[in-house]
Image: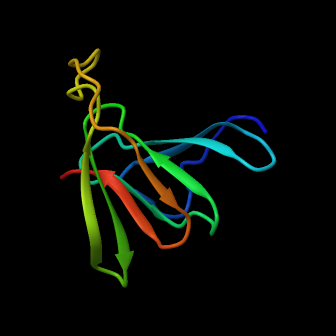
Amino acid sequence: GGAWVDPEARGVAGGASRLRLGGGENWDALVHVFPSPGASYEGRWPTGSIALLKPLVGRVETSMVRGTTSRLGAKELVGGGDGSIGGGGGSGDPCIKYLGGPIRRVGTRG
């Protein structure tokens, strides 16, 4: 499969975009771009799938969603840079691995 941009994907809010870098019959490499505070993606990965989440720059929060407002197990992750262009040093937080199933929200802090 080829690359695509999916700006109207379900669950994308606040100017976020979802980009598919590549994939095959049983896998996809996706990048979620959150250009402003409050931008987010909310969705579910298929049961049995593995999702690795790693912020590249800035700060993101990930949590499980139950109902319309309840967020469980929120975790903040820090990317390798400070969010500026060419940005800061350091490697940031390690990635988080999720197994598919519950609805999760990933977005910028703010």
Please tell me which residue is depicted at 76% across the width and 50% down the height of the picture: 26
Where residue 34 appears, as percent x and y from the top left, is 36, 43
Q: Quadrant of residue 2?
A: top right
| Residue 47 in the image, given as x and y percentages of width and height | 62, 69
Q: Quadrant of residue 4?
A: top right
Tell me where residue 13 sits by quadrant. Answer: bottom left
Q: Above or below — where is 15 with respect to 54?
A: below
Return the x and y of residue 3 as percentages of the image width and height.
69, 35
Structure colour scheme:
rainbow
Q: Eyeballing the image, is 76 above or below 100?
A: above
Position of 102 with respect to 46 (left or right) is left
Residue 43 versus residue 91 in the image, above or below: below
Q: Nearer the viewer, residue 23 or 68?
A: 23
Q: Nearer the viewer, residue 49 or 8?
A: 49
Comparing 22 with 33, the one in front is 22
Q: Residue at x 28, y 37 (%)?
A: 93
Q: Position of residue 103 (x, y in %)?
A: 46, 71
Q: Quadrant of the N terminus?
A: top right
Left or right: 80 as drawn, with respect to 47: left
Residue ID at (22%, 23%): 84
The vertical placement of 96 against 80, above or below, is below
Q: Is residue 20 left or right of residue 83?
A: right
Residue furthest top as drawn: 86
Q: How many marks?
A: 0
